[in-house]
Amino acid sequence: MKRVVTGLGFAMSLAVLLGLVRPAVGQINFDNAVNFAAGTRPDGAAFADFDGDGDRDLAVSSEVPDKLTFFMNDGTGVFAAGLTLLTGAGTAPGALSAADLDGDGDTDLAVVLKNSNSVRVYHNNGNGSAFTAGALVAVGAEPVRMLAHDLHPTRAGTADLVVTNRTGNSVSVLLNNGAGGFSSTSYPVGADPRGAAANDFNGDGAADLAVTNHDDRSISLLVNNGAGTFSAGALLSVGAQVRPEGITSADLDNDGDFDIAAATGDPGFATVFLNSGGVFAGPFHYSVGGAANPDSIVAADLDCDGDVDLATSNQDLNSVSLLPNAGNGTFGAAVIKAVGTRPGTIVAADINGNLSPDLAVVNRDSNDVSVLRNLGACISPGDMNCDGSVNGFDVDGFVLALTNPTGYGQQFPQCDIRNGDINSDGSVNGFDVDGFVGLLGG
């Protein structure tokens, strides 16, 4: 189904007059990084509300000893080390995904164990004070990145997992049985896959996959048959001069289709493919600012103008690049912020309640995490999936925010649930339904 962008000019102007939102500034403005120690060789990171207090905490994996550390948010974006989970000597914990994995309404955690080619699930006791080790699921050889997404639309409510396997030249899909048990199937992709993104690229209602193949300089598309099994789709070349690493997906050009952006090096680009009805145009390369060798990439509205911007972590420059979207899927000059040494995984969430996405990046060689606070403040009433428009694709998100706020935060970590507080009474509830319907009607 093709999404049609509806007119929100009057509604947004009224919202500004009533004080519901601040006017969009359209300028990326982040504070300098604040760093805190995160163990030896930190690797994975995930924002989520683990303790159920309404703000986003941060989980980080590290080594020596092999462990997961939960850094708890005091509500202002200041983090303190909390619970530590040991994953076992020599397991080498890596990528993390936070989501409700067992259907009990709180946020669990999955971690890639690199040295055992597996994923371990940890179940939250409900308030983040304890986690119980759950399923250990085999994946392919040398797993490197992971994401959580609902891949089985007829069995919604718990997240599935996707893992890229570098030397296995495969992607493992872990389908959730609804109670935290997983069945694993691996699908062949190109050489040395590094990252994966999930979205409905062909408009059939089921999330497909895009996987970066580092050595093949390509992106493999895998088409979901509607039940969480996949077949090979198009192969997108990123060009002969670059190799892709991390990948993300969002509607970058505001046409209603989900596009793709990959971190590619060297020297260093955000490489964009624009989707039109399931057919991709590109690659379009946007410099992240020199010989950066970018590793990870995330999409979020960094400047509060309603468009989805991009941020990359730059391994060789010890920096993060913030690329502003012109609104049509083209990107301006990068704003560069210094972080720690050898930055890797980058994640986005509103950590201090100012209604704008902040960033955190793990720095492998300086053994710390850099937090960059967004100095802007933005909210988009009704835009429940944060794609820059209000339309039928926001209905599921609005219903989820009404019925399961925790699940909403897990499914849409880049969004603020207050997008659903249409009447600005401080909560998302039944009194917002009429206003939401009005925004849908334009």
Image: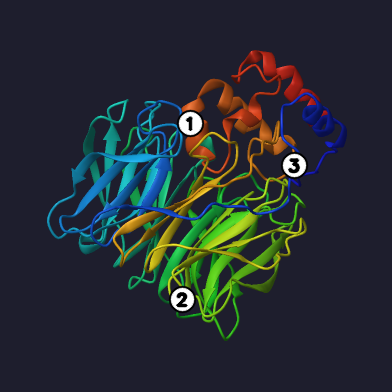
C-alpha distance separating marks 3 and 2: 33 Å
What secondary structure is marked by label 3? Answer: loop
Whichever of labels 3 and 2 marks the residue nearer the N terminus, that label is 2
Whichever of labels 1 and 2 marks the residue nearer the N terminus, that label is 2
Which of the two residues, 425 or 163, is positioned nearer the viewer here? 425
Residue 389, numbered label: 3
The x and y percentages for residue 38 are 28, 53
Residue at the image point whose x is 73% and y is 61% from the top: 329
Q: Is residue 210 placed above or below 88 in the rendered structure?
A: below
> Which quarter of the rendering shows the C terminus?
top right
Q: Which residue is mark 1?
A: 407
Cβ atoms at labels 3 and 2 below 8 Å apart? no
C-alpha distance separating marks 1 and 3: 21 Å
Pair 3/2: label in front = 3
Q: Farthest residue in the bottom direction?
A: 240
Q: Looking at the image, can residue 424 be seen?
A: yes
